[in-house]
Structure formats: structure tokens, C-alpha cells
Image (tube, rainbow, N blue to C red):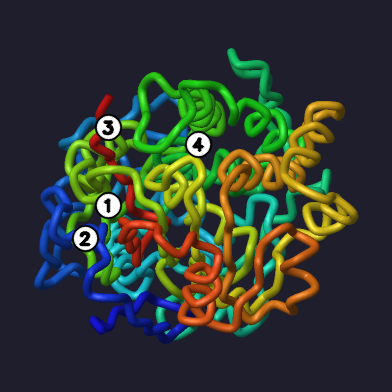
């Protein structure tokens, strides 16, 4: 029988499928995927060139920070001398928001050219602070922190870990048009030059990751994240939607309120190689990168499948079940309403959210989850249960992971030791005379948006 495999943690899970089954692999760069671009030969040089192509003013605090100007002196134009700009830079503070350990951003390629460009503009490393944009996630461990920000690259810079529940860390900047109270990390906002570094890929309800989101959500208060996320069930909130997505436009407004000056973002392929580098004002970067990236992440999937076998894409996208849910969302897009899904996700850090896990206790089925969710106020964590229920109700969802079987059952998934074991269970559940099934494999489901061919 043909052999297949999908990412699982830092390795993979292999499995066999019968030859007479109708099997397709749906992934960027796979047959049926649209326009996946190849890796850049020298991504660090691409980042250097992207930064070098920007107007010098964007790096000069006399331009972006009026309070640093010499009294009576106008802001410099593009012809201003580097010496004058560097003098002000010596008194300015730079804040760089970077994603946490749940996002695979290639900092080793991005940070050296960024730091070099800042130093060229006159900033010393002692004036540069990195902010770990945790959002509502748990703080990274020491080992995870070293992976996010390699000490050999960021030596001399300060590092702060954001805590969305610490009111002392936050400053209130007003209320957005969507009604979101904009509370962002105070030290970041009060810095003179504010930068975000991240990657751009589809987001299940925000449309796209990247841009100002690393600060507007990653460095926001719990109240802000909750208020923004309560809109996730609106019909215009979905993967690959940007300008008509109210949640994403809310993020852009908060980015402007926080005064984010510069975004350095990348687009990556399924091997996590950089395919494009974009630098500039956050909204300009988003528009340029989305136009480039749209075909990377959508794939023709044909007819809905009887079975979808999906992996978030391996570590860190399957670091816990909370993150793995994103793979289920895209897998469900490709599955029949009564089809089955097998998720291959190691989840070495467990479930990933205490409230989600405790709230699910004693729930007997996903219909009960839906009913309970509708009866209470929106809460982060509980929203994950709602999203899982939307995709899993009416379907049988198997989870091949390192989680305890009792935990998996309590969350209403079917635990299996492996994808192969899940396949055997699913085969037994099928009628004896059932026709050969249609099977779709999504090895990188978090970043693959299936586009179905529907008939009838």
C-alpha cells in the first residue's frame, strides 16, 4: 500500500492507505496547490535590501519623535545628514515586538540586518528593547526565550515579556470604531521608534497574521484581546480576508493608535523557507505581502472528502491543542459534513489553556458545547471550545497526540496512539459495502486554505 507521512512535533507520522482509495495531498507546492514560490537564496540579504530601500526618515527619531528635536528646529527632510539624525538617535528608545514561541518566525535571518540598520541610524544596542508579544498565551520558558531571541544575535539589547493581565504594563489609548478599548504595553507605546517583526500567513478569523497585529494583539491587554476576539463568529471574519474583515481592520486602527512605525515581515513556504521579505509602514507591508502571499496558502481541493488527515505542520504549530485547533478549522473546510478528521499533533505542552480545559469538563457532546456557549458572555479560552464545536459537530475527530487519553476524551476528541491507529478505527466504523473513500491529506493545515469544487 502507498506510504504517506505528515509532520508531527519535530518529526513525522507515517501511515499507509489502500491503493484503491481516492487520495490527494493538499499543500502549498503540492499537486493542486496554487503558485507556491521557491525559497530565497539569501533571505538575510533580502531583509537588508528591504530595509535599505526605505526612506531614511522612518528610522530617524527627529522625524518620528518631535520631542527629541532641538528647540526651534524643523523636522529634517530626506536630505538631512546622518550625523544630525544619529545625535537624536542616541537619546531615543527603540521597541521591537516579536512573536512568542508559538510562531515560527526566522529571527536569525531577520534580526541581524534590522539591528545593523538601526545601529547605522545611530541607535546603540543599550537603547533597543525586544518585547515578547505573548498576547493571551503563557509566558515562554527560559529555553523557549533563547529560541525566540538567540542571545548571540541580541546581545546588548534588553528583553521584556508582555503580560496581558498586568494592568501596570498597560496604557489606555482610547476606543476603536468597533468598540474595542485599546490598551497596549505602556513601555512599548512610550518608546520613540516602534517596530514589529513577524510572518504573514492566513489566520482563521483575523484573515492574515502579521503587520501591526504583533503589537496590537500581541502586546495588548486581556480586555482588548477579548473585545476584539468576541467578533470572531461574524461572517466577514475568516481566512485570507483583509480589507473587509472587521477584526483585522480593528487591529490596523489599534496599530495606528499605538503609533507602530515599521513592520519587518516575511512570507514562508511549507518548509519554513523565506520566500519574500517586506519592510515599511505596517499597512503598506500587509497590502504588499498579501498580494504576494495569497496564492501560497490556497489550494484547490476538489470535492469534499470522506476523511481528512491533517497536521498543523509540526513544531511549534502543534505545541499544544489550543494551537492545533487552527488545523481543524482548515481540515473541516475540506471535509464532508458527516466526514471524519484525523489530527496528527504532538501537543508536548498539553492543552494550552486552563479555562478551555476546565470549561469543557462534563460536556457530553459538541451540541451541548454550542448550547452552553450561547448562554454566557464571551471569554477567551471558551471561544476555542466554540470554534472546535463548529468544526467537529457531526464529524468524528481523531487526535493522534502525546496527550493522556482521558484528557482527549474529556475534550470530545477520539484519542489514538498514531495516525495509523486512527485509520484502523475509522475503517471499522465504515459500512462493509461502502465505496472507496475520498481522502485529503493536509500536511501543513494551519497555513493551507482548501478551495473546494462543489457541485449540485
The x and y percentages for residue 177 are: 59, 13
Please tell me whether mark 4 sits on a helix, a strand or a loop. Answer: loop
Q: Which residue is mark 4?
A: 205
- Numbered badge on residue 47: 2
- Badge 3: residue crowd in 10 Å (few <14, some 14–19, many ≥20): few
Q: Which residue is mark 3?
A: 454
Above or below, comparing residue 99 to residue 228 in the picture = below
Above or below, comparing residue 382 to residue 316 in the picture = above
Q: In the image, which is nearer the foreground, mark 2 or mark 4?
A: 4
Q: Which residue is mark 1?
A: 83
Q: In the image, which is nearer the foreground, mark 3 or mark 4?
A: 3
295, 83: nearer the viewer: 295
Q: CA distance from mark 2 to mark 4?
A: 28 Å
Residues marked 4 and 1 touching at CB (< 8 Å): no
State which tag comes first along the sequence, 4 or 1: 1
The residue that appears at 37% across and 30% down in the rendered structure is 241
The quadrant where residue 42 appears: bottom left
The x and y percentages for residue 384 are: 67, 46
Amino acid at each position: 500500500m502507498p506510504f504517506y507521512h505528515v509532520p508531527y512535533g519535530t518529526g513525522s507520522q507515517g501511515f499507509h492507505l489502500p491503493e484503491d482509495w481516492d487520495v490527494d495531498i493538499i499543500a502549498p507546492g503540492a499537486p493542486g496547490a496554487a503558485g507556491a514560490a521557491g525559497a530565497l537564496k539569501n533571505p538575510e540579504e533580502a531583509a537588508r535590501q528591504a530595509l535599505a530601500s526605505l526612506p531614511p526618515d522612518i528610522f530617524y527619531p527627529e522625524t518620528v519623535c518631535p520631542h527629541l528635536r532641538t528647540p526651534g528646529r524643523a523636522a529634517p527632510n530626506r536630505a538631512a545628514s546622518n550625523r544630525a539624525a544619529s545625535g537624536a538617535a542616541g537619546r531615543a528608545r527603540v521597541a521591537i515586538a516579536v512573536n512568542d514561541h508559538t510562531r515560527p518566525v526566522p529571527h536569525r535571518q531577520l534580526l541581524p540586518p534590522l539591528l545593523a540598520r538601526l545601529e547605522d541610524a545611530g541607535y546603540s544596542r543599550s537603547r533597543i528593547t525586544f518585547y515578547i508579544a505573548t498576547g493571551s498565551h503563557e509566558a515562554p520558558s527560559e529555553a523557549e526565550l533563547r529560541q525566540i531571541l538567540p542571545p548571540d544575535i541580541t546581545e546588548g539589547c534588553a528583553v521584556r515579556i508582555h503580560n496581558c493581565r498586568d494592568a501596570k504594563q498597560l496604557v489606555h489609548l482610547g476606543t476603536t470604531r468597533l468598540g474595542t478599548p485599546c490598551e497596549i504595553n505602556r513601555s512599548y507605546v512610550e518608546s520613540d521608534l516602534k517596530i514589529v517583526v513577524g510572518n504573514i500567513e492566513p489566520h482563521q478569523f483575523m484573515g492574515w497574521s502579521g503587520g501591526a497585529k504583533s503589537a496590537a494583539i500581541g502586546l495588548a491587554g486581556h480586555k482588548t484581546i477579548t473585545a476584539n476576539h468576541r467578533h470572531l463568529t461574524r461572517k466577514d471574519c475568516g481566512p485570507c480576508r483583509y480589507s473587509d474583515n472587521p477584526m483585522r481592520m480593528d487591529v490596523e486602527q489599534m496599530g495606528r493608535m499605538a503609533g507602530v512605525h515599521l513592520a519587518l515581515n516575511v512570507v514562508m513556504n511549507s518548509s519554513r523557507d523565506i520566500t519574500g521579505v517586506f519592510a515599511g509602514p505596517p499597512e503598506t507591508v500587509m497590502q504588499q505581502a498579501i498580494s504576494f502571499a495569497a496564492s501560497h496558502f490556497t489550494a484547490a481541493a476538489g470535492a469534499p472528502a470522506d476523511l481528512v488527515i491533517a497536521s498543523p505542520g509540526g513544531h511549534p504549530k502543534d505545541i499544544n491543542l489550543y494551537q492545533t485547533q487552527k488545523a481543524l478549522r482548515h481540515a473541516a473546510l475540506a471535509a464532508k459534513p458527516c466526514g471524519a478528521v484525523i489530527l496528527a499533533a504532538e501537543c508536548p505542552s498539553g492543552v494550552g489553556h486552563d479555562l478551555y480545559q476546565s470549561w469543557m469538563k462534563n460536556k457530553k457532546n459538541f451540541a451541548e458545547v454550542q448550547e452552553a456557549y450561547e448562554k454566557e458572555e464571551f471569554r477567551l479560552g471558551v471561544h476555542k471550545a466554540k470554534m472546535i464545536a463548529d468544526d467537529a459537530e457531526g464529524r468524528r475527530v481523531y487526535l493522534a497526540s502525546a496527550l493522556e487519553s482521558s484528557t482527549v476524551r474529556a475534550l470530545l476528541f477520539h484519542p489514538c496512539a498514531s495516525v495509523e491507529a486512527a485509520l484502523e478505527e475509522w475503517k471499522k466504523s465504515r459500512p462493509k459495502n461502502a465505496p472507496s473513500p475520498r481522502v485529503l491529506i493536509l500536511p501543513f493545515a494551519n497555513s493551507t486554505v482548501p478551495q473546494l469544487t462543489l457541485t449540485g
